[in-house]
Amino acid sequence: MIDVLSLLIATFPASMTAANLVLLGRAAGAPAPGALVSVLIPARDEAANIGACLDAALASAGVPIEVLVMDDGSTDGTARIVEARAAADPRLRLLQAPPLPPGWTGKVHACARLAEAARGTHFLFIDADVRLAPDAAARMAGHAAANGLALVSGVPRQRIGSLGEGVTVPAINLMMLGYLPGAGRAFTNHPAMAAACGQLLMAERGAYEAVGGHAAFPRRLHDALALSRNLREAGHRTEVVDGSPLADCRMYSGFAEAWAGFAKNAREGMATPLGLPVWTVLLGAPHLLPWLLLPSPWAIAALILSFLTRAAITLRVREPLWTIPLHPVTVAVALAIQWTALIRSALGRPAGWKGRAYQPVDVP
């Protein structure tokens, strides 16, 4: 009976994935006349990334741009690299973040200050490890104009260079495409169905300022989701598009860094006392439990459906094919991260990232 239930639960992410892969559109459209895209990059100790990030951003075509980098207390050569490029390109400006005020998280504070200094009609927030395609800014601004969107976001193509990344990073698209109804498309206009990826997020200036921008949620770590929900609650339209043609990104360099990175956001997502037991069933029953029920034919069918679901997502978002056989490990690690984050929160231990510690925020 348990094996049959496992197969039935496996049909949920499978059917959700099939629908979302059809629904997930690509950014298209011409920017409105007079559009100016401000590419906004918060950077803290990003000397290894910032040069290539800037080269890609400054190669943008199809819409006028400016590029602003907020150096947030870096102790490496981040600022020097930006200064050297700014001397050769007037579209680039380096800003220095003021001291982090009490009650703020670092990235949210840097993004808020970047938006204050920007001159654009659209704010394109990216991380320093993101490499924009030349037409990304124009396509996102055009998509926003063509569809009346206050926010356009996408998950960049994830570059995965180690086993540790291979068992962690693919969970992003699994959750987005396998478990979120509509995958963040604008027709799912309820705030609870909002989605966004902070690696690649464009907001229309007027709507962003009307809802208070990043200053409306100074303590949050998952800033993209908070902004998307705030915009929807105010009646604005937000949408997730296929980000793989727009940018690529290598988020982390190994397992330890990936674990820490995902853990810091966990309490604002799945890792809640009420939500995580449900997520454990939704993820564990179709992707992990069948292994314990072999050789039941129902368990075999559940595993086949699980791997087909993962393969379809991997092919669409252009992640490495070698990560597909690691799928059960990816799910197990994702749940371990979430449970660890919840337990650490219950013990009063803060989340740490880049030398800063943050107490988790309970999100309804």
Image: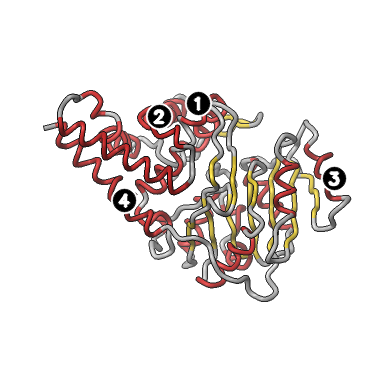
Mark 2 element type:
helix
Which mark is drawn over residue 83? 3
User: Mark 1 — residue?
Assistant: 163
243, 185: nearer the viewer: 243
| Of the image marks 4 and 2, the number of the one nearer the N terminus | 4
Q: How is the image coloured?
A: secondary structure
Distance from disc 4 to disc 3, alpha carbons, whole Å, reads 46 Å
Pinpoint residue 317: horizontal percent, then vertical percent: 47, 47
Q: Are marks 1 and 2 in contact (CB under 8 Å)?
A: yes
Seen at 69% across and 48% down, the residue is 41
90, 323: nearer the viewer: 323
Q: Could you tell whether 1 is left or right of 226 in the image?
A: left
Kind of residue sitting beneath label 1: Leu
Mark 4 element type:
helix
Kind of residue sitting beneath label 4: Met
Distance from disc 1 to disc 2, alpha carbons, whole Å, reads 9 Å
